[in-house]
Amino acid sequence: MSAHDGTIGPDDDAGRRRSPSEEARTLVSSVTVGHLATVGEHGDPWCSLAAFGPTAEGHPVLLVSTESEDGRNLLRDPRASMVITDPSAPGDPLDRPRITLSGRAVQPQGERAEEALDAHAAAIPGARLYAGWDEFALFVLEVEQVRSVGGFFRTDAIGREQYAAAEPDPTAAVAAKLAEQLNKNQSDGLLTVARELAGARGAVSAFCTSIDRYGIDLSCTGAGQSAAARVAFDEPLAKAADVREATTELIRRAQS
């Protein structure tokens, strides 16, 4: 289906997207609670909710009571995994992006312990109130394997080096809010972007479904059809504050 014959038809060149490892690192940096699985005393699996804050390398830092089941399990057997998902994501829970981090929970010492506590407290500010209690122990889940599920039939195995080398998307904290503002205030501009930059010539409406550091995703409708389209920014964005100007520039470019 041609992009230039009056029908909906986004260009083939959709621009770069976040890699599975970048998606995983972004998810880890965006939420503070996961499902922690540990090995029980008799080898039985044990799963519970756990708050965490990630290190610079994306390893979850846990502050766990050693009187709890998972705390006792980690002291006895460091093997653990954590499932992390975004509970605020819309739609079917089983179709939302999620990851499983698998590795070994170690207790950092000295400067590493201070750095780990800083990482945990950055995500869970109240943690410092009980971090010094004798019954609480600090663990870092050193990630060895990652399984990423991007949705239905979209899975990826991510190696330790890939995961550690990837960066969280700096725009993630503001992307949803700014997409909502674009849809509310720039509907005509988004339609022009869809037609002129995404090649959806037959579109009669377009709204932004998501934004990331590399570009925006659009849902376009027209002529009884609907299609997804993507438009890349000129350069990957370095910080959240760049999103507004980058999307405004796309609209300017489309209108010119």
Image (cartoon, helix red, strand yellow):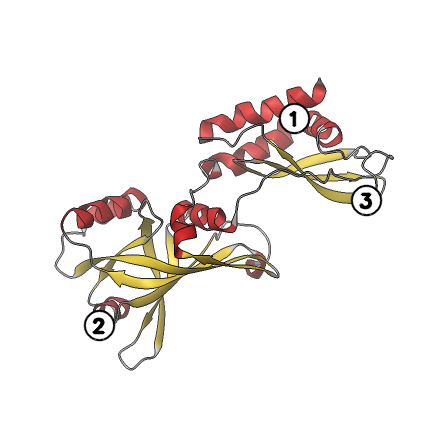
Label 1: how many Cα within 10 Å (few below 14, some 14–19, many 20+): some
Residue shown at the point (45%, 45%) measured from the top left = 26
Q: Amino acid at mark 3?
A: Gln
Mark 2 vs 1, N-terminal side: 2
| In this rendering, the label closer to the viewer, 1 or 3 | 3
User: Label 2: which residue?
Assistant: 76
Q: Is residue 109 above or below residue 218?
A: below
**Going by the picture, which residue comes out furthest to the right?**
5
Q: Secondary structure at mark 3?
A: strand
User: Label 3: which residue?
Assistant: 225
How far across and down, in percent of the image, does residue 247 sit?
59, 27
Mark 1 vs 3, N-terminal side: 1
Q: Quadrant of residue 107?
A: bottom left
Tell me the distance, in whole angstroms, between the alpha carbons under discs 3 and 2. Answer: 58 Å
Q: Amino acid at mark 1?
A: Gln
| Image quadrant containing the N terminus | top right
Residue shown at the point (79%, 35%) measured from the top left = 203
How far across and down, in percent of the image, does residue 130 sit?
18, 52
Left-right relation of 110 to 23? left
Q: Amino acid at mark 2?
A: Arg
Left-right relation of 213 to 111? right
